Image: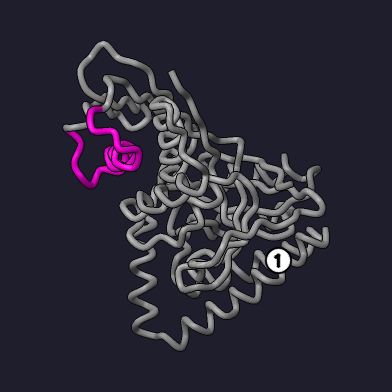
Amino acid sequence: MSSASAPGKIILFGEHAVVYGHPALAVPVTQVQATATVAPSSRRGVWVEAPNIGLSSELSDLAPDDPLGAVIRSVFSTLGVDRPPACTIYIQSTIPVAAGLGSGAAVTVAVLRALSSFLGQPLPENQVNLLTFEIEKLHHGNPSGIDNTVVTFARPVYFVKGRPIETFRVAVPFTLIIGDTGLSSSTKGVVEDVRKAWKASPEKFEKIFASVDRIVQQARRTIETGKGSALGPLMNKNHALLQQMTVSSPELDRLVSAARSAGAEGAKLSGGGRGGNMIALVQPEMTEKVSQALYQAGAKRVLITTVS
């Protein structure tokens, strides 16, 4: 038997602009995890059991574009396994689906690690990252690559599409509250909508993306120099730009406003938008007050994480 896990992730700054070659900052969220366990089976074939999504199926019955089926087949193809041994791949996850926390990438990374180890040929991390990016295309169409990178390497990342991975130093830990709207949102659909809007008004969107770029650079310098409180105003500015991209929603705006009113130093949506999560920067002593305000404003789930 072989087991592996992978964390969730949250984008601090730069979502959507990152698709167009601008930088983004993202960090792992270890409070939520995806886990894959592979064990020999008395049943013929390769079975996939994923109770979180109500899936129980033999691999051959999964469609060619099914992400779980695709990731399993990619392991066999990469390792040159023509006749896979009878086994069951059991997948569990505490990461909300379609909420901007990297659920798809985390499940993929966990399966790649567990299955390759079960077959006696553990994949190196760089290859896990590349294979996960390919599966992310099935989830999101035109992914930036940030989810697979942060989830695979499980450390804070400064990411620019097409460039080597850069991790960055967190000089002083800071606390984030993640508020879940409870609304599922298709990152793929939102990314496509932004692309259409960008094509219709390229000058407008390039100015927005350039502003986001400057915020990301400022945020990285702020984190690396330990001036975490300065991140709050940058979050507020980034959220306003995401609103201009039309990727926010009344539910997200309500949670962002509630967090700020309750004493958060800044707040913004995180991820694809139009649902999913928002994040708020708080002093540790304010976590309870801000958390309660988020629940009162309609949050379905609240997570508290320390970025370090």
Q: Does 76 appear in magenta?
A: yes
Q: Count residues near mark 1 (Cα–Cα under 10 Å), then give few for <14, some for 14-19, many for 20+.
A: many
User: Which amino acid is tagged 1?
Assistant: Ala
Relative image position of residue 107 (x, y in whole percent): 43, 38
Q: Give the residue furthest to the front.
A: 80
**Left or right: residue 253 compared with residue 130:** right
Query: In front here: 298 or 55?
Result: 55
Q: Which residues are magenta?
A: 61-83
Q: Give the residue furthest to the bottom.
A: 203
Residue at image coords 70%, 54%: 281
Query: In front here: 42 or 186?
Result: 42
| Residue of label 1 | 219
Relative image position of residue 188 (x, y in whole percent): 35, 59
Query: In front here: 81 or 107?
Result: 81
Q: Does 124 appear in magenta?
A: no
Q: Is residue 204 above or below residue 109?
A: below
Residue at image coords 34%, 42%: 78
